[in-house]
Image (cartoon, rainbow, N blue to C red):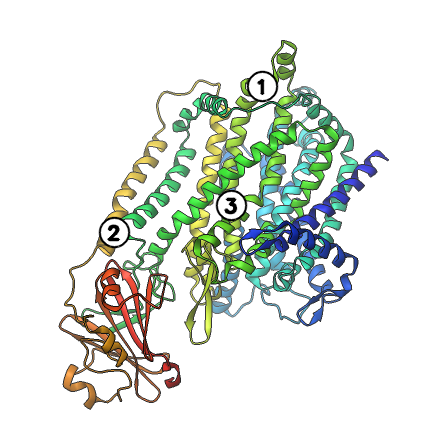
Amino acid sequence: MVVMRRLLISFILAVIGVVFLSAIPMGVVGTSFQWGAYSDGVSRIAEALMHPGDLQTGQYPLFPMFWGPFFYSLKVLFGALALAILFGFVCSILLSLLPAGVYRAVKSMLFFLESLPDVLVAVTAQLVIIIVYQKTNVLLFEIAQSPMDENGPYIIPILCLSILPTLLCIRILLHQIEDEWRMPYIESARGKGMGSFYILIHHILPNTILAFFQHSKMIIWFMLSNLVVLEVIFGFNGVMTLVKAANKPEVFAIALLLLLLPMFCFFALGSLVTYKWQALQETAATTATSAPPFSLRLKSIFRYLFRHLKGLKNLWYEPLFISGLCIIVVLLTLSLIHYFVYNDTVPQTLLLYSSSGELIGKGPFPPSQQFWLGTDQFGNDLFYKIISGAKYTLGLTLIVSLLRIAFSLVGGYGFSILPARTKIWLRSLVESTHYVPAALLCFLILSPTIGLPTFSFSEKGWLFFIVVTLVAIPACSVLIGSEIETIMSKEFIESSRVLGGTHRYIFFKHVWRHLVPRLSYIYIQQMTYVLILMAHLGLLSIFFGGTRLEEYMPNYFIPVSNSSEWSGMIGAFFAQMSIQPYLILIPVAFFSVSILATNFMLEGLKRTFDLYEAPRKKRIPFASILAVLVMIVVLIWIPQKFSADLAPKEAKSQLVQLDEGKEAFAAGKIPGLKLPLDTTWTADTYEPFYKKPEAREPNMYGGEDVRFKKDGATFTYKTGLLNLVVAIETSYQGTEAEIIKALGQPTSKKNKTLQYTFKDNTVLFKQQKGQTWKLTLKNKDAVKHR
């Protein structure tokens, strides 16, 4: 009866938590949070739950249309969960019986595979299926689903969704099995003549099932987040796709509550089985935490922090930590050099010409010796876009993770000193976050604001920063509070209290010493979670600093990030995945490398603190020295490429003079060029001035681009269907101040582009690199000539 009452209370609190979380998007108005709007949102969601039949998505009622996508996602989710648990147990049993050397090698390989983000797994699976089909005309699995088809494919989504959870299950089980092998009863069993396989199946495995169940909520939360990515990448008509398309908190709340019901039943059944064990654990964890709170002094915190971080000097002896740190340092340092020395310049190559002036190709260009990572659809060099975006992606990750830990430490301490009954209720309330995909919640909060031009880059950036930081604090606070509880339940804490130790003394002398290593682990784990969350938001077209639409071809726009961070590249390149696979694989690969680096650092920290009291070798391992040397070489070599590609070249002859620019632009001329806009384009028109053109090619206006070169300067005339000149392009060498001095303040100024309007003509100065500008003159009605 007690168990059922506790489960009922937990379910009610989980429902309340989901409702409160779902109402947060309604409380965010612009870039501020309004409590009045939030309370109204809670009321609206409660009303929607009472009358779900009144909800609509577009012009259609939500029900019964909702049930098809919901049951499809539910089948995929639980099918993948069953597959992950089955393979996790089977593989763990087989791996535990391997020889020690083979076991360590396989475990190292699993560690590497765990670092692969779900985005990379889904993208790679889709590309492999497409490439095999293109080469052999054999479709391995169905990966497409009609918008009207309620019965989508099952094999490929279940397989993709189960891969990473299977690895997570294996890691958890292997860790528990390793601990069990060290228990005293194992020696007793061996002394009675029992074999390793018999001990593993009849003694160790039953004991690991209890601990495995405690981690199952994390696995479910992980799979829910992966389900969002899977449905977006493959375009399946699941419940996550429906919630995203509806973009309504009411639909979000109903979907989560319906997903909560079967998952809560699964956990409730497990809790009934493990209730006695859980009760013993909770009693032990809460008996020593009833002391009154005390005041924390900032000076004392920092003094004890630095005193107990002295063990970090041993990190030099952990090659894994040094290797991961070197990767992060290289990416951040190169990005900062690129920003401060070269002004974040990204070379742009739309057309590639030979030394003789012949057209070789048109972007995007694949990776090559000239373009290390290729170029995107706008001709931007991806290597420099990756370098430019690293400071936003990794810098944001470091700061957000640090703030999560700082706020959660305060919340965790407050949680640890609450009464036992209050902690049980609060834990049940916070556990509702395990049923909420963080990416989908952030999407609902940020999507109304992040794409609006009425808000500045800084306003959108701050909103993104705050939301991504706060979304994980409740769960992280409970996690840290539980760690404090565990430490406070140790016998030496009770001994210290009996000897007269004050609560403040016990906390800083004993608890803090044991808490710092755990905070280090949690911090690096949060770095991984933030990177994964940003990758997920990129697929949902939510970018740091805002999202804008940029025309890729006539009447076709793609989302582009205002800050060039990596998740923006994923969102921009997602639609071209099957045409140019390298475009999306490159930012996903750098996310993977960064996550691998954080996992290296986490594993190095664990090994360092595990051996904190053990004597260490005085000689630094060769692998650590090699990692640092490679970092130094890269930091010397790559800036030389920056210098070669981005340093100001010897200025070409200046064709354009802006002294009489206003009058010339108003008349449809670029000062320095002979032919104006609306010129009828024939050989008789241009040959007296420019002779033969260097190159011709079709353009989006229905005419052609005709390129000339004269006196070291290059310029292009663009014609339309009526054979009239509709636009003229050339380059200009000068500073922004010189342009403004000659032409006055621009009509608009954004994204390194100055726009002027003179009568019916528009003039654009788009900064390329350094003091080089792309100058475009076109008529406002140029589109009529297409």
Residue 493 in sight here: yes
Q: In this view, does 213 lie above or below 161?
A: above
Of pointers 1 and 2, the one earlier in the residue sequence: 1
Q: Where is residue 781 in the image (x, y as percent from the top left)?
A: 37, 82
Image quarter in which the C terminus is found: bottom left
Q: Residue, x 45% and y 37% (percent of image)?
A: 600
Q: Distance between the residues labelled 3 and 2?
A: 31 Å
Question: Given the image, on which type of amino acid does mark 1 rest?
Answer: Arg
* Residue 704, quarter of the rendered image: bottom left
Give neighbour class at mark 2: few <14, some 14-19, many 20+ (Cα, 10 Å): few
Cα distance between the residues tagged 1 and 2: 55 Å
Q: Which of 737 and 87 is in front in this view?
A: 737
Q: Work out how far the residue at label 3 is from the one at label 1, CA to CA, in angstroms.
A: 33 Å
- Secondary element at image label 2: helix
Q: Nearer the viewer, mark 3 or mark 1?
A: 1
The residue to which callout 3 is attached is 530
- The reply to whether the C-beta atoms of the residues labelled 3 and 2 are less than 8 Å apart is no
| Amino acid under disc 3 | Val
Q: Which of marks 1 and 2 is in front?
A: 1
Residue 209 percent location from the top left of the image: 69, 35
Residue 285 picture location, percent across and down: 68, 25
* Residue pointed to by mark 2: 641
Residue that numbered label 1 is attached to? 504
Labelled disc at residue 164: none
- Residue 378 x %, y %: 36, 66
- Nearer the observer, disc 3 or disc 2? 3
> Is any atom of residue 160 visible in this view?
no
* Left or right of residue 292: residue 297: left
Q: From the viewer's perspective, is residue 293 above or below residue 683?
A: above
Quarter occupied by residue 444: bottom right
